[in-house]
Amino acid sequence: MKVIQGGVTAPIGFEAAGVEAGIKYQNRKDMAIIWSQVPCVTAGTFTSNVVKAAPVKWDMQLVADSPFVQAVIVNTGIANAGTGAEGMRCVKETAEAAGKALNLPPKAVLIGSTGVIGPLLPMDRIKAGISKLVEAKAHTPEAGTNAAKAIMTTDTVHKECAVQLSIGGKAVTIGAISKGSGMIHPNMCTMLSYVVTDACIGKEALTALVKADVKDTYNMISVDGDTSTNDTFLVLANGMAGNPEIKPGTQEYEDFAKALRYVNETQAKRLAGDGEGATALVECIVTGADTKENARILARSVISSSLTKAAVFGKDANWGRILCALGYSGALFDPEKMEICYEGGGQKILIYQDGLGTDFDEDIATQILSQPEVRILADMKMGTETATAWGCDLTYDYVKINGDYRT
């Protein structure tokens, strides 16, 4: 596998675009399209929030029941959540308008929305935006980047990734764009992530890969502890690479799974590191856990802790915050038989061991906590299982951003 330039237009047969439609924002791109020249199989996961946005309900049905999909239309600024029957009408109209413009059945068009909960979509602008998108879509790297920029809300940077590997003597490419900065918490987040590939793979095999992968990527990030109404992670595969179909139990399946993991982990870390107001990516690596699930629970608990996140922002090596977060996680362990370290900037210090804080150098701790990437290492000394979770520090700017997000 090799990392290549680009995003969703890197694989064969995929085109994209991002345009300004004036949904909420002015003078910025706020609608995107991803389109495949041929029908795709698809798999996905969605928010665990009981309150689900209209586009999430639409996409869930299509992923489960539609014989194929071929396009994705995304708008930012308005989430189309908490909008009842009118919201579903807007989704249907969007899919019908896109289907007519692309010569597709509406059930082949996936829909994504992100932004403020409550308002209805301005359908005249949505439909005009679709016309612009269809005209602008292209296979160029710039078109993929425009789509990545168009799905941003409070993100400070666009997020795209692409890799290539050989399957059966054919070059197979995977590309992705994602957005997310706030309202992000494990079990999906205010996150939209779209992954496309030209690999030939069946729907059942793709679904199995997606469900397994999300447990250790997108579901291992947290910015603020809030699980959104709109979280969507979709993978589309159009088979245009011409490789022999990827089958479970084969080396090709394992190779493809590793490449997909790289893409999703890369995007997940970018989402966590671009948390609203964040100044540092915080990574918690739990080792020595008794079970894989407990390792996940412990790592997620640490990076979800507001007090731990605030301590990182304040450059305060307060190991008590971390120990406390491990303790209330729900996973059982012996706090007098484990250790915690900080790591970053090429330095590592032991801060807690076997029930007591260590006599660590506060200056070195401050240097580590001043890095753009800070790692918290927790060795539970109970077994061999490990897990990694990602978050960010909690800053004053997070409150400023969210204090007036709607108005």
Image (cartoon, grey):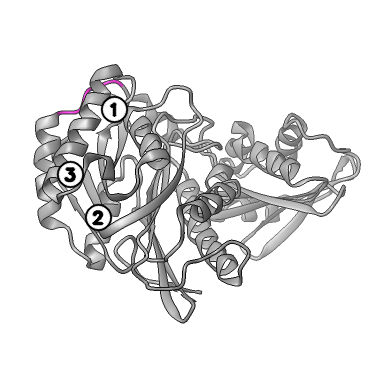
Please tell me the numbered disc located at residue 80.
1
Task: Please state which amino acid type lies under the numbered disc 2.
Answer: Trp
Residue at 70%, 35% (x, y): give it.
Answer: 321
Q: Residue furthest bottom?
A: 169
Instruction: Report the Cα–Cα distance between label 1 and label 3.
Output: 20 Å
Q: In terms of secondary structure, where does tag 3 sit?
A: helix
Instruction: Report the Cα–Cα distance between label 1 and label 2.
Output: 22 Å
Q: Which residues are magenta?
A: 118-122
Q: Where does the C terminus fall, quadrant-wise?
A: top left
Main SS of the magenta part reads loop
> Does 143 appear above or below 379?
below
Q: Residue furthest top?
A: 84
Residue at 50%, 49% (x, y): give it.
Answer: 207
* Residue underneath mark 2: 35
Badge 2 vs badge 3, beta-carbon distance below 8 Å: no
Residue at 23%, 50% (x, y): give it.
Answer: 33
Q: Nearer the viewer, residue 130 or 376?
A: 130
Q: Is residue 224 left or right of residue 327?
A: left
Q: Earlier in the sequence, mark 1 or mark 3?
A: 1
Q: Earlier in the sequence, mark 1 or mark 2?
A: 2
Task: Please state which amino acid type lies under the numbered disc 3.
Answer: Gly
Q: Nearer the viewer, residue 20 or 372?
A: 20
Q: Quadrant of residue 313?
A: top right
Badge 1 vs badge 2, beta-carbon distance below 8 Å: no
